[in-house]
Amino acid sequence: MSIINNSKTDPNKILPMTYLWARQHYKDGVANNWVPEEIPMQDDIEQWKNTTALTDEERRLIYWNLGFFSTAESLTANNIVLAVYNHVTNPECRQYLLRQAFEEAIHTDTFIYCCDSLGLDPEQIYTMYQSIPSIRGKDDFVVELTKSVFDPTFNTVGDGNIQSFVHDLVGYYVIMEGIFFYAGFAMMLALKRQRKMVGIGEQFEYIMRDESIHLNFGCDLINTIVAENPQVWTPAFQEEVTVLIKKAVELEKAYAKDACPDGILGINSQQFCDYVEHIADRRLERIGLKKVYDTENPFPWMSQATDLSKEKNFFETRVTEYQTGGLDWD
Ligand code: MN
Ligand code: FE
């Protein structure tokens, strides 16, 4: 059995399964099922329209995060459907990829809902990925980094091509979903902790839980390809992947400083940068590489927000225990 380049794989025959982790990620996704309309936006709308409820700095970071995420979610959805799905024929992995594609559609819908509720100018929000250099820097990096899989003649046969595929999966999953989303998550959740823009904050919380599963799936996919093709995981290739992740960390720190130059109440922009280094170390370790930064987590509350064991009860609007055993992933 092998997860790629397996001529015996029948994509339509899902049982019996070989890769049970793919099934588990599917179930974890279902346990976090949500749609943005379930979250009321009335308080957010009032705060947004009230000229004194939010500082200029807070408005800036909200704009920057809506500007980045509104287009990054579609970019991710397109990558999954047009590039990754083609090359991963294993049926339980494809079942997960379909779930992930659906969740990316929910996330894209969330930013439509935010723009509509707050009355934002879509021309402004949906062009920030081109007009704001720190956002464009991240998107350009991922597009450049994941070029080979998008080539219509690309296949995964041979060690060089397997390396290219792993390289691009690192770009999609570890860098885009695992690093480039996290300064924004920390900012929006920090605002929510101060009771500011709690509706959007809650939507970001749900998105972050989905993304932590996407990231876990991506890392398991990478680790399985490497375990089945150990000859591709050379010291030189490991170094190449580590260098890419370090470049991504610099881009994410530049974004954090640009979105939030003076910090927000009680948090300075350096702490957002420390957080990016901390999570980058976790990503490196998750794919079997040595950590680089050894930076302490400045926001221990972030891992709690990712915990899937807390499912909101919409009727009582309080958090209730939904299932036992959640993900501990920050
Ligand atoms: Mn997403
Ligand atoms: Fe995702």
Image (tube, grey):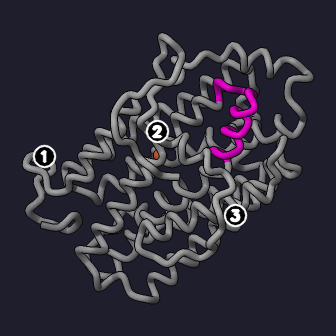
Label 3 neighbourhood size at 10 Å, few (<14), some (14-19), many (20+)? some
Please name the residue that numbered disc 1 is placed on. Answer: 14
What is the magenta range? 184-200
The disc label shown at residue 312, or none: none
Which mark is first along the chain, 3 or 2?
Answer: 2
Residue at point 65%, 68% (across, down): 295
Say if mark 3 contacts mark 1, CB within 8 Å.
no
Locate residue 329, reporting x and y percent: 47, 52
64 lies above or below 117: below
Residue depicted at x 83% and y 18%: 49
Seen from this angle, which residue lies furthest top? 315
Query: In percent of the image, x 7 and y 49: which residue is there?
Result: 16
- Crowdedness of circle 2 by 10 Å Cα count: few (<14), some, many (20+)? many
* Residue type beneath disc 3: Leu
State how far apart marks 3 and 1 are (Cα).
40 Å
Secondary structure of the residue carrying tag 1 is loop
Q: Position of residue 41 (x, y in %)?
A: 65, 17
160 shown above or below 136: below
Q: What is the residue that sits farthest to the bottom in this orientation?
A: 235
* Gap between marks 1 and 2 measured at Cα: 23 Å
Label 1 residue near ligand 2, CB within 8 Å: no
Label 2 residue near ligand 1, CB within 8 Å: yes
* Residue type marked 2: Glu
> Which dot marks residue 251?
3
Mark carried by residue 104: 2
The magenta stretch spans residue 170: no
Most common SS among magenta residues = helix
Residue 168 picture location, percent across and down:
45, 66
Sequence-earlier tag: 1 or 2 = 1
